[in-house]
Image (cartoon, grey):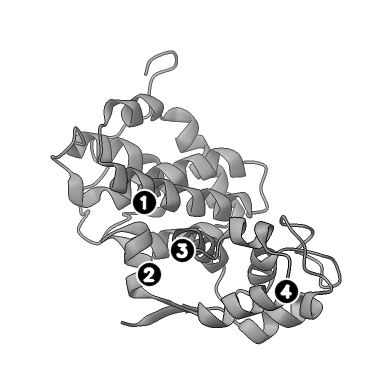
Amino acid sequence: MTTIITIPVAQVVERLDHGRLWTHGWGDWEHADTPTCMFGAIRYCQPVPGDAFLVEQVGARFGFGTQFNDQTFEFDQIESALVANSEITDEMLAATFGPQWEQVVALVRRVAGLPVDETSRLAAAASAASTWATWAAMDATNAATAAAMDAANAATAAAMDAASGDMIAAGRAAADAAGALVMRDLIGLHGFTQHHYDLLVGPWVSVCGPVHPDDTSSSSSWQPAERGKP
């Protein structure tokens, strides 16, 4: 078991002013003297951009997610949860995102650091793609679908944190890539094909490169959809 992400507990507790600035819901996490929730504080203090969104999904899986924050009324419980889960391990990430967890972590961190020019290009690629039908055509297992949703949510949140007017479309491309990445090991099963995978990761790959080290030719079959066609 290896620690992959470390929550800076002391900094998070300080950001929340030992409970005085802790609240339910995100709040205004960006400013040091305004109320926010536990995950807003983690976001404020995260040593690596994007990690807060990964921690949020892991927290939801292991019982200390946003629902825990919103249903807790004693800050001591929040602080105890932070201490108990300060080390996010490879096992926790694998349980949340599946066997491709390492690539999911890399993708979410990459999304969080997207420069404006790449965000714009990614938004354009996403706008040219048609992925809803691709998702609808698949019949993946419940476990894989849940993990894909977790990864997609983390990627979307990281993209929405980017300072760009194109962040919503870019977030969709990142979410599609993250969700497909989680199910990469299921290609050929449950109605999930290589073609589906290539279509879903295609917009991301066209701008940011492969999402998995073995995807040497991924998205080669992806082309922007013609206007008015799926």
The residue carrying mark 2 is 92
How busy is the neighbourhood of tag 4: few (under 14 within 10 Å), some, or many (20 plus)? some
Please tell me whether mark 1 sits on a helix, a strand or a loop: helix
Q: Are marks 4 and 1 in contact (CB under 8 Å)?
A: no
Q: Quadrant of residue 45?
A: bottom right
**Mark 3 or mark 2: whose residue is earlier in sequence:** 3
Q: Is residue 72 visible to us here?
A: yes
The residue carrying mark 3 is 58
Q: Residue at x 38, y 60 (%)?
A: 96
Q: Residue at x 41, y 64 (%)?
A: 105
Mark number for residue 187?
A: none
Q: Quadrant of residue 166?
A: top right
Q: Quadrant of residue 56?
A: bottom right
Q: Are marks 3 and 2 in contact (CB under 8 Å)?
A: yes
Between the residue at mark 4 and the residue at mark 2, the CA separation in whole angstroms equals 24 Å
The residue carrying mark 4 is 75
x and y percentages locating residue 2 in the rendered image: 34, 82
**Mark 4 or mark 1: whose residue is earlier in sequence:** 4
x and y percentages locating residue 133 in the rendered image: 35, 24
The residue carrying mark 1 is 147
Please tell me whether mark 3 sits on a helix, a strand or a loop: helix
Q: Seen in the image, is 155 located left or right of residue 29?
A: left
**Mark 3 or mark 4: whose residue is earlier in sequence:** 3
Q: Are marks 4 and 2 in contact (CB under 8 Å)?
A: no
Residue type pointed to by label 4: Phe
Classify 18 as above or below 68.
below
Which of the image's four quarters has the N terminus?
bottom left
Between the residue at mark 1 and the residue at mark 2, the CA separation in whole angstroms equals 12 Å
Between the residue at mark 1 and the residue at mark 3, the CA separation in whole angstroms equals 10 Å
Between the residue at mark 3 and the residue at mark 2, the CA separation in whole angstroms equals 7 Å
**Mark 1 or mark 3: whose residue is earlier in sequence:** 3
